């Protein structure tokens, strides 16, 4: 075992990264994300300085709406901010998520994906809460394990400054958030190398100040509003490449490899599964067993970057030998032709076929 390894759950592993990159942390605890807020509150109360050399201010608001409102206002002031939530709490944040994404404010929040209350309440993990925000404009980054949650939290906090697209980093509630496992924590030296200081300064310069007054939150007619919305397309198109470059840099620093879509399994797989988060670990072990003992050609695409969805990186991960693609969603979308991830994969394969990118 590496001497630097430690044994903690994903909530604490992610909270340590969020604390390192934040100047204000607005919280309203909700199961199963509450420990992240509690850890940050504890460290702040103890006067622990973070990577930026400051003690983050932790503010508990009256609701999830208040927490994301505080985040939005603080981001407008040019301060690095984060929050944590899950389930119905995430849905209460939707109006501000549209604003934060539309205003291109660098930001990363962390979500322990949890079922929404429908016919009954459930506190256990599926992706119905995260899928409910997929059209807000937030980038969605998924983690499957304690180590991945720790690593991808750092990648999200640093990539958002360069890409100018805010991130929702999510991992399965309880199954991952409360899983106690051994992982290798990122050192302050590695985190500093991941942080683009010029991008951070550019973000700070955009903060509201009486010395440089600007107009924000205007009302626009359709002709101008339409152009403003379309103008952001290029940023979403560039984000997968920016994240991939950051992941390559991360691999050089740590030896751990991540991509927008990670493939494992037989190099000439004929049957390929597509999934996100904790279920991919079970799938990977099963596929390895089947390959060794039964000789079946099976593979798995582990989706990390779900939004914006990159056709290019998906096709890079998909073996050209694939004959069947099996998509495993962890949500129920009543009235839809299929669940969200399945629809995205179908659209990707259709687009690739029309463009002549499939054999």
Image: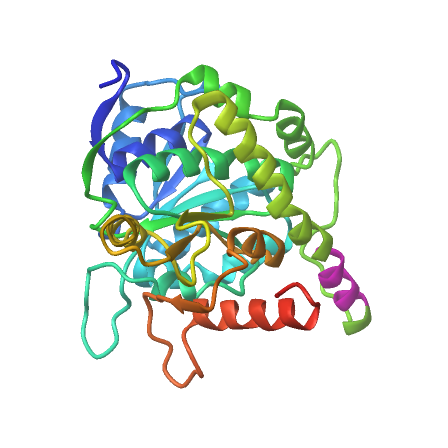
Q: How far across and how far down the image is residue 64, in percent?
A: 36, 54
- Give left or right: position of 136 versus 294: right
Above or below, 321 relative to 196: below
Magenta span: 224-232
Q: How far across and how far down the image is residue 19, in percent?
A: 38, 30
Q: Magenta region, mostly helix, strand or loop?
A: helix
- Give left or right: position of 205 versus 116: right
* Quadrant of the image occupied by residue 248: top right
Q: Residue at x 36, y 58 (%)?
A: 298
Q: Residue at x 70, y 68 (%)?
A: 355
Q: Is residue 300 magenta?
A: no
Camera-side residue of 257 and 268: 268
Q: Could you tell me if residue 74 is visible in this image?
A: yes
Above or below, 243 relative to 310: above
Q: How far across and how far down the image is residue 200, in percent?
A: 62, 29
Q: How far across and how far down the image is residue 165, in percent?
A: 60, 47
Q: Could you tell me if residue 53 is visible in this image?
A: no
* Quadrant of the image occupied by residue 201: top right
For the C terminus, give its image quadrant. Answer: bottom right
Q: Residue furthest bottom?
A: 335
Above or below, 177 relative to 298: above
Q: Residue at x 51, y 23 (%)?
A: 252
């Amino acid at each position: 075992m590496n001497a630097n390894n430690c044994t903690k759950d994903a909530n604490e592993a992610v909270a340590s990264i969020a604390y390192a990159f934040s100047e204000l942390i607005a919280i309203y605890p909700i199961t199963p994300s509450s420990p992240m807020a509690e850890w940050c509150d504890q460290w702040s109360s103890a006067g622990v300085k973070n990577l930026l050399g400051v003690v983050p201010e932790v503010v508990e608001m009256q609701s999830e709406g208040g927490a994301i409102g505080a985040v939005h206002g603080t981001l407008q002031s040019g301060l690095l901010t984060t929050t944590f939530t899950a389930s119905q709490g995430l849905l209460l944040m939707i109006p501000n998520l549209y604003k934060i994404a539309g205003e291109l404010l660098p930001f990363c929040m962390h979500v322990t994906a949890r079922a929404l209350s429908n016919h009954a309440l459930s506190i256990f993990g599926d992706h119905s809460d995260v899928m409910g925000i997929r059209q807000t404009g937030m980038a969605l980054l998924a983690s499957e394990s304690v180590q991945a949650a720790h690593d991808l939290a750092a990648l999200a906090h640093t990539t958002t400054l360069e890409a100018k697209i805010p991130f929702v980093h999510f991992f399965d509630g309880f199954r991952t958030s409360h899983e106690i496992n051994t992982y290798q924590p990122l050192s302050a030296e590695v985190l500093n190398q991941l942080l683009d200081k010029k991008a951070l300064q550019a973000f700070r310069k955009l903060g509201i100040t009486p010395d440089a007054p600007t107009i924000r939150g205007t009302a626009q007619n359709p002709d101008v509003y339409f152009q403003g919305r379309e103008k952001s397309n290029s940023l979403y198109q560039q984000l997968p490449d920016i994240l991939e470059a950051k992941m390559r840099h991360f691999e050089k620093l740590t030896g751990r490899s991540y991509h927008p879509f990670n493939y494992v399994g037989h190099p000439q797989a004929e049957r390929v599964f597509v999934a996100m988060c904790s279920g991919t670990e079970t799938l990977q072990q099963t596929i390895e067993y089947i390959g060794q003992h039964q000789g079946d050609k099976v593979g798995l695409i582990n989706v990390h970057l779900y939004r914006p969805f990159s056709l290019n990186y998906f096709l890079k991960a998909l073996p050209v030998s694939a004959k069947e693609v099996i998509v495993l969603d962890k949500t129920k979308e009543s009235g839809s032709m299929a669940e969200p991830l399945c629809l995205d994969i179908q659209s990707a394969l259709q687009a690739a076929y029309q463009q002549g990118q499939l054999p």
